[in-house]
């Protein structure tokens, strides 16, 4: 099998894996929509307790990490070392997780006192952002492995960096849905 065919197969495998991940997140998104329609006032109230500045900052950080990952893929495709871009990607991912952890701690008091629909809001918030964080930690593991082996990648052999980039971008896209769901839609709909 040619190198190009192996690369195509590897990337197809990653796309297939990401499709299963969409199915994994799907029930939580469905649960959110169902709960929001059933108890809209509780979701508005819950959204008003979110730290919008931290959420917005985290969105900017994660989108910047998406840029650095794209630059890592581009560098590998051109035969340049992707290491510095992978290092920056990991750094941005770690900063995102640190801010998210601080935010979870700050919001825990509100969540502990919530009841009814607002408790459902917080359950979905912690479940969905927690699952996102688990995926981000996995992505950090992938990026760390790629960074460790960065000198192996060149224009002829860049598929692992590209596949890792696909996973990283998937995690970013999930956040782009979570951010407005918990921080914006309910806040500005009332």
Image: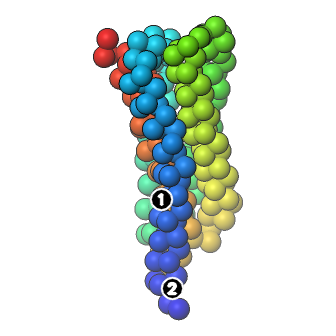
Q: Position of residue 5 (x, y in %)?
A: 47, 84
Coloring scheme used: rainbow
* Residue 54 falls left or right of residue 40: right
Across and down, in percent, residue 69 comes to 49, 52
Estimate how packed mark 2 is, as few (under 14), some (14 to 19) or many (20 or more) residues with alpha carbons within 10 Å.
Answer: few
Q: Quadrant of residue 36?
A: top left
SS for callout 2: helix
Give the CA separation, mark 1 to mark 2.
24 Å
Q: Is residue 132 above or below residue 81?
A: above
Q: Nearer the viewer, mark 1 or mark 2?
A: 1
What residue did someone put label 2 on?
3
Q: Is residue 180 above or below residue 4?
A: above
- Badge 1 element: helix
- Image side of residue 153 versus residue 64, left or right: right
Who's the residue at 45% across and 38% down the image?
A: 30
Name the residue located 55 percent from the left edge and 27 percent from the top edge.
125
The percent coordinates of residue 77 (x first, y second) are: 45, 69
Say which residue appears at 63% left-offset and 22% top-offset.
Answer: 104
Q: Tell how many labels.
A: 2
Q: Is residue 24 visible?
A: yes
Q: Are marks 1 and 2 in contact (CB under 8 Å)?
A: no
View extreme (bottom): residue = 1
Locate the C terminus by quadrant: top left
- The residue beneath circle 1 is 19
Characterize the local packing of mark 1: few (<14), some (14-19) or many (20 or more) Cα atoms within 10 angstroms: few
Q: Earlier in the sequence, mark 1 or mark 2?
A: 2
């Amino acid at each position: 099998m040619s190198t190009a065919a192996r690369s195509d197969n590897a990337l197809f495998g990653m796309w297939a894996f990401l499709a299963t991940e969409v199915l994994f997140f799907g029930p939580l998104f469905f649960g959110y929509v169902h709960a929001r329609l059933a108890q809209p006032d509780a979701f508005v109230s819950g959204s008003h307790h979110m730290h919008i500045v931290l959420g917005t900052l985290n969105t900017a950080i994660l989108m910047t990490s998406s840029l650095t990952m794209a630059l890592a893929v581009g560098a590998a495709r051109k035969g340049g070392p992707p290491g510095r871009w992978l290092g920056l990607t990991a750094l941005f991912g770690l900063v995102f997780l640190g801010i998210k952890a601080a935010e979870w701690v700050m919001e825990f008091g509100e969540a502990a006192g919530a009841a009814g629909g607002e408790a459902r809001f917080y359950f979905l918030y912690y479940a969905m952002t927690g699952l996102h964080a688990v995926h981000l930690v996995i992505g950090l593991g992938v990026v760390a492995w790629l960074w460790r082996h960065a000198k192996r990648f060149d224009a002829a052999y860049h598929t692992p960096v590209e596949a890792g980039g696909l996973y990283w971008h998937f995690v970013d896209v999930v956040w782009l849905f979570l951010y407005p769901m918990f921080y914006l839609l309910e806040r500005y709909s009332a």
